[in-house]
Image: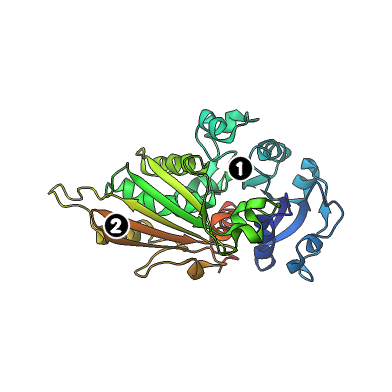
Amino acid sequence: MNEVKVGIVGATGYTAIEVARLLQSHPSAKLVAATSRADEGKPLAEIHPSLAGRCDVQIETFDALAIAEQCDVVMCCLPHGASAETVRELANAGTRVIDFSADFRLSSVKVYEKWYGVTHPWPEKIGQVVYGMPEFFADKIRDAKIVANPGCYPTSAIMPLSPLIKAGLIETSDIIIDSKSGVSGAGRSAKVATLYCETNESISAYGVGTHRHGPEIDDLVKRISGTAVSTIFTPHLTPMDRGILSTIYVRPRNADGKNKLASAEDCFACWQACYDESQFVTPVEHLPATKHVSGTNYVQMAVRPSGDRLVLICAIDNLAKGASGAAIQNMNVMFGLDESTGLK
């Protein structure tokens, strides 16, 4: 097929630069357009110096028709609440869109508006947009006009939980998700909580009981497994640039109808069967660490017994499989390329 022409809307953030970086080595896709309200006319490499000598794209003002004429697909890297209207303009202009915000991830308008505190500008699309996780939704992604790119924390919980819930190996309640993320997950805008002196040599919980990724995890595990779950999700900020490590505490269920609870070995075998054809999700015997997947689109998962619980551990790169790498993977599926193109 012809080279896929890609645009980025909201081109100044960390996810945008990661998309641009990945596209520099993609053999079948090219970045041709980038927009930002504040930096019109500047070279993208001026905003992201790591692209100097590798990218000659100039930042332009957003115009849906103009962008659609240039691009086969647009990566929309705008914030939650601000993205939906832009996605609608782009879709109506005739280009395909991968949306990095949460504006189309959830199944319910009511749940979205409760957790994000805004009235959705395109409510009829809620529940109609495919979730961008090819491991479960590749057939729908292939023909999609709009793809909702997954959240980073949710990816690290959905991947290990969904197959085990679907197989009936673990209880659907009393699921505790303890996640730790690098500071890039908070975005590039200046905030007191993410200043060097606030984050260096410190780890802190935030959004306890109120984080917006909690309902996304519950929603997607239900969509994939067909079973509702109840989770407690607590995120933490850690003094590293990138990466997510999620430690998930679950209770095993009766696995065989003979009063035998599911074992760690049962869970590992379930993962192996589920992800046998996946190019990126890897059940491992060792304990995963963020260093093991940094800068890659890979997911490493392990399981250990602990008293009357099982402990699931999942490591991803929040900017790769948790955002931009997933978007490239989705783009590959949308345009008939191998999922791993440009990602290995």
Seen at 67% across and 40% down, the residue is 83
Seen at 61% across and 52% down, the residue is 186
Q: Looking at numbered disc 2 in the image, what kind of residue is underneath it?
A: Cys
**Could you tell me which secondary element the residue under label 2 belongs to?**
helix
Whole-percent x, y for residue 85 in the image: 69, 35
**Could you tell me which secondary element the residue under label 1 belongs to?**
strand
Describe residue 278's horizontal placement relative to residue 90 as left or right. Answer: left
| Residue 119, above or below 31 | above
Q: Looking at numbered disc 1 in the image, what kind of residue is underneath it?
A: Ile
CA separation, marks 1 and 2? 33 Å
- Give the mark, 1 or 2, whose residue is nearer the N terminus: 1
Residue ID for mark 1: 146
Q: Which mark is residue 267?
A: 2
Q: Quadrant of residue 45?
A: bottom right
Describe residue 236's horizontal placement relative to residue 59 as left or right. Answer: left
Whole-percent x, y for residue 253 in the image: 23, 48
| Label 1 neighbour load within 10 Å: few <14, some 14-19, many 20+ | many
Return the residue nearer the eye: 179 or 330.
Answer: 179
Q: Which mark is residue 317?
A: none
Structure colour scheme: rainbow
Q: Is residue 31 visible?
A: yes
Q: Is residue 138 visible?
A: no
Whole-percent x, y for residue 221 in the image: 41, 44
Return the residue nearer the eye: 335 or 47.
Answer: 47
Seen at 49% across and 48% down, the residue is 139
| Residue 91, above or below 167 | above
Quadrant in which the N terminus is drawn: bottom right
> Do the residues under discs 1 and 2 have CB atoms within 8 angstroms?
no
Q: Nearer the viewer, mark 1 or mark 2?
A: 2
| Label 2 neighbour load within 10 Å: few <14, some 14-19, many 20+ | many
Whole-percent x, y for residue 41 in the image: 87, 54
Quadrant in which the C terminus is drawn: bottom right
